[in-house]
Structures are given as structure tokens and as C-alpha cells.
Image (cartoon, rainbow, N blue to C red):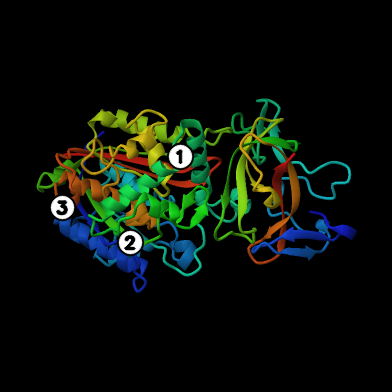
Amino acid sequence: MMGSLGILTYFTNGGEVMSVAKITDIPPAVPGLFTLPPYDMCPPMLLGGFCQVCNRYYFPRPRYCRVCLGEVVETTLGSKGTIYCFTVVLRKAPLGLPNPYGVGYVDLTESGLRIFGLLDPAAIGRIQIGMRVRLAVAPLGDDGHGSPRLRPYFTPV
Amino acid sequence: MASVEIIGVGMIPFGKHQERTLVDMGAEAAFLGLKDAGVKPAQVDACFFANAFGGRLFGDITIGQNVFWDVGINRVPVINVENACTSGSTAFYLAYNSIAAGQAELALVVGAEKLYVPELGLLNSGETEWETQLGQVVSTGFAMRAIRHMMEFGTTIEQLAQVAVKNRRHGQLNPLAQFREPVTVEDVLASTMIVKPFTRLQCCPNADGAAAVVLSSPKVARTLTRRVRVNAAVLCSGSYESPQDLTHWETDYRAAKLAYEKAGIGPEDLDLVECHDPFTIAEILHCEALGLCAVGEGGKLVEENQTMLGGRIPINVSGGLLSRGHPLGATGVAQIFEIVTHLRKEAGARQVERAKVGLAHCMGGDKAMDTKSCTIAILSV
């Protein structure tokens, strides 16, 4: 969704395409869930937690390990997964998300976690259960008051 | 555990009450409950008030004290309860526990909610939650459960629609239900698509409403007729480890097992069930978890009219959330109202014949592929 000359385009409520400032100027909708741009060196990835004692992954990263209450270190959870299930919301999109928008549960390849996430608005007609997807990050929706926010979403590989 | 009885219930019609406040509706339900029980305000020694959205929509807090003073109750413990859609049934659970523990002799539970406000939008678990920020609304989890159930068990869209058709048919017989016009499978499937695969008529309507239940120890209940015994009241929260299975709803099965164990009965002993049906698939899943049919056969159960009034195990004879409407804090209390009404043989046109044992089931909120709470109460005469 990156436009030419570093100007970014994104979908808004109503499906129109808007242009805004540089991606690095836009804050994430939720801090700590995914790696932030620029993505010159490596693709966007989800951020989670790992307890080295219990050998357990978490998403999002909790303050304490839920088994041993020990330290949970921040870790990347990769960018690849498989669609377990998905749906499309056709009415009253919240937070400036496009109408319609898709969400799903994705089985992450590296950690085995099954997590909730947005789907690529440009690809919701093509998404299927069992499909391999990768993570992307772009301005998608807003903060509830019209200021754009970065959100992670899954797009077909 | 000491036994606990229900000695009174009250409920106002669910629907649009735009001229009324939460307190006004709650107080009327409380009044109806106290009158039904035949008790005076001074006899009540513990109060529980359930509401989910009053704080968010109106900025109100500690609403219970206002409601209970409007029916002349003060000084006694008042507890304000919020647990999403199970706020009302959680308040009931707390009242049950407080009497069973000997802390109170006579408790009043009121649930009230006012959801007809402009620009409500789709309900969610709160805008600070990361899943809400990534587009989760209450309907998305149930929608994906429906899609997986259809894929794994061959459940059809017509079977989903039949849940809505049946509950509307039941609602026609309930003067307190919000939507009472019959609908057909074709009507349900032709209504506006909201969240795939749910059309509008597969989603419960918002509502304003209130309901009340009066509970007592056997010592107080002995002086009253028309009493109903509480055999079990359980509350569970969800399983948040990943991954969870969307079709085998572990929390639902766990709560059912616990309730049956505590009551010392099984699903075959039930005469009627009120369950949480905010979306059609929910009733199908709960039938399976409650052991009313085999796993995967919830769709067939409704298709064969087994859950219709007059069928093997009538479900949501009140009309359910789909027809009665879903004023969150009031819903769990309204379900108890319905079961009690049948056990006392006072349900009129929708009376389940020979009703001796009934079960009320509710769920609320979303977290990590599961619910935030699940309640079950088993009542009998």
C-alpha cells in the first residue's frame, strides 16, 4: 500500500483512498504488538513474549509468565501463518476501518499461537480457510477521533 | 451447601423505553419482584444490581443504591455488578452465595439496561483492548464459530436461520418480548447481511429493560407458597491459553459439567432451557455443550423442531435474546424470571407442560478466542 515518493495511501471508512504523511510519522493503534517501520531491513513482524523457563510463547507479551510468574522476554513471532477462520464485517465499521473489513484467527507458523487479527482490505474476497498469509503493516483506520493509526493485518502470500 | 429458594420475580416488557431512565426501569422491576414475593422493603437484607453499559453511556456509577432506595431499601449491603451479558446472572450467583453462606436471609437481585441511545455502534469489550483496536466486535467471534461449525459438521445456513424462526415463534407468545412478529427462514436469510454469515435477523436486537428476582433462605421461604428451589448457580470465566477450538467451546462444556454436578442431575432431567442466543449459532453450540444433543448435531436438533415449544426439550420459550431483546444487565435475570414462571405454571400460552426442572445459561464478553464469563443456574419445583 506504499505509494510513490514515500507518500502513503490507505483505506478509510467508505472505501476511499487517502494520502497522508510518511508511515514513520503515524503511531501504532496499539504499542508493542508489532515491529515499527521503516521495514527496509526486515519485513514487519508481530511482537510477543517468551518464557525461557516454561518454553512458552505469548501474544501479546504479558508482564509475567502465566505459568511460573517469571520473566517474559520480548520476541518476534515471525510474519507467517495460516488462516484458521475468518469473517467479514459489513456494517458499522468501528475505528475508521474500511466498510467492509475482514478479521480472522491465524495459526502462526513459528510459535503455534492462534491469534486474532485484521485481514488485508484489498484481499478479503480472496481469503480462504487454510490459506497461507503473511503480516503487513499500514495505516488502517484511526484512533476513534480521525487520526490515522498503523495496524497489522494478514495478506495472502 | 444450604438450600436457597426463589420467592418472587418481576420484569418489565423489553423494548424501546426512551422516556425512561435506568433507575426508573430497575425500580419498577424491583417493585414487581417484591410484590410478587409478598415481602416488605424492610425484610430485604442484601441487594445486588446488575448493569453493563450505564457507566460508559451515561457516566453513572453505583446505580443500585438509587434503584433500591426507590423501593424503600437502604442501609443493607448493596453490590453493583458488571460482567458484560452475564451481569444479571452474576448478580443472581452472588445473591445465591450470600444466602447459602448465611450472610443474608432475603436478597433482591435487579438487572437493568438502557441500550437505545443514538450512535451506539457495534458493541465491543472496551476500546483499550488490543483485539477491539484490531476490529473485534461481539459478533465476529460468533460469526467465526458459525463458519467453523458449518465447515466441520455440515451445519447449514438454513439451520442457523431456524433458530431465529423458532425463537420469534416463541416470542409471539410472550407479552414481555420486544419482537413478536413471526419470520420465515426466507425472511431471516434475506435480511441485511451484518457480519458473514449473520443477517440482521440472526443477531439479537438491543433493548431497554429490567428484571428482578427475590431469593431467600428456606427459613423465610417456608412461610410462602409458589417457591422454586435453586439447585445450582455456577459462574466460570474463560480459557485464555492459545490455541482454542471455536467449535468445541471448552468453557461452555466446563460450566455445564460443574452445574450438573452441583445439582446432581443431568441434561436428560431438564424440562426447559433458557440459553444465551445473541446470534443463532450460539444456541446451537450451547445445545451441544449442555448435552442436549451429540457434538455437531445442534443444527439438526433445531431443524427437527426438538427445541420448539412442545418438542423434546424446549429452548428459549421466552423468545430468547433474539426475540425478547438483549438489555445486557437485565438478560440474565430475565432468563431466571422465565424459568421460574414455567415452574410455577404461570407462563400462559407459552407454558412448557409438566415443567419441573429448568436451566438458565448465559455468557458474556470476549477475550482471547473465548468468553469472559459463563453462568448456569438450575432451578426446580
Foreground tag (2 vs 1): 2
- Mark-to-mark CA distance, 2 and 1: 25 Å
Relative to A61, B218 lies left or right: left
Secondary structure beneath dot 3 equals: helix
**On the picture, is B207 further left or further right than A44?**
left
Quadrant of residue A27 within the rendered picture = bottom right
Q: Relative to B140, say whether B57 is above or below.
A: below
Precedes in sequence: disc 1 or disc 3: 1
Which residue is disc 1 drawn over? B237
Taking the spot 38% from the left edge, 32% from the top edge, the residue there is B297
Do circles 2 and 3 both sit on a common chain?
yes
Residue kind at label 3, given as amino acid type: Gly
- A150 vs B135, left or right, is right
Q: Position of residue B282 (x, y in %)?
A: 42, 43
Residue B348 numbered mark, or none: 3
- Residue B192, can we see it? yes
Residue type beneath disc 1 = Ser
Q: In this view, does A103 lie above or below B354?
A: below
The Cα atoms of the two marked residues, 1 and 3, are separated by 36 Å
Per the image, label 2 sits on a secondary structure element best described as: strand
The residue that disc 2 covers is B209
Task: Residue A80: give x, y in percent of width and height.
Answer: 73, 36
Q: Earlier in the sequence, mark 2 or mark 3?
A: 2
For disc 2, the neighbor class at 10 Å (few under 14, some 14 to 19, many from 20) is many
Seen from the viewer's position, the closer of residues B174 and A45 is B174
Tag 2 subunit: B
Q: What element carries label 1?
A: loop
**Which chain's residue wears label 3?**
B
